Image (tube, helix red, strand yellow):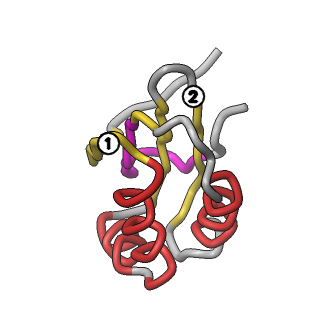
Amino acid sequence: MFANTIKPPYYAVIFTSIKIDEDKGYSKMAQKMLDLAQKQDGFLGVESAREDIGITISYWKNLDSISSWKKNIEHLKAQKLGQELWYKSYKIRIAKVERDYEF
């Protein structure tokens, strides 16, 4: 399923990660973060896939909404736990979506 985004331009936060094998509460926190992100002003949707590498792309109306999400207290706690418990490594990229189309 694809995120239901608005007419461009909008922004994508691309989070790629390599997880540690044990769950250690990861699944529960991932769902909590998704529920919380959906309540954030400017959140448009999310798409995610995990195999050897995890890729989660969240879509946002503008850079201010991304900045607000980055500073969210609960999200900050999850980021800290991610570094301590869940991820071997991760990378975040922020991109402006200029055009989209679909089949």
Q: Which residue is at the far bottom?
A: 73
Instruction: Judge left or right: residue 68 versus residue 54.
Output: left
Question: At x 45% / y 25%, what residue is drawn?
Answer: 53
Prevalent SS, magenta region = strand
Q: Measure the alpha-carbon separation of dots 1 and 2.
A: 13 Å
Question: At x 27% / y 42%, what residue is drawn?
Answer: 91
- Label disc, if present, on residue 50 of the rendered structure: 2
* Magenta stretch in the rendered image: 5-17
Q: Which residue is mark 1?
A: 90
Q: In the figure, 11 relative to 29: above or below?
A: above
Amino acid type of the residue tagged 2 in the rendering = Arg
Please check the rendered image and state whether residue 10 is part of the magenta-colored stretch, yes or no. Answer: yes
Give the percent coordinates (x, y) of residue 39: 64, 75
Please check the rendered image and state whether residue 23 is part of the magenta-colored stretch, yes or no. Answer: no
- Crowd class of label 1 (few under 14; some 14 to 19; many from 20; radius 10 Å): some
Give the percent coordinates (x, y) of residue 29: 63, 63
| Label 1 secondary element | strand
Whether label 1 touches label 2, CB < 8 Å: no
Question: At x 62% / y 72%, what residue is drawn?
Answer: 36
Residue 103, image quadrant = top right
Q: Nearer the viewer, residue 10 or 51?
A: 51
Q: In the figure, 102 relative to 42: above or below?
A: above
- Crowd class of label 2 (few under 14; some 14 to 19; many from 20; radius 10 Å): few
- Image label count: 2
Amino acid type of the residue tagged 1 in the rendering = Tyr
Give the percent coordinates (x, y) of residue 12: 39, 46
Q: Nearer the viewer, residue 39 or 31?
A: 31
Instruction: Judge left or right: residue 41 versus residue 72.
Output: right
Q: Which residue is at the far top?
A: 103
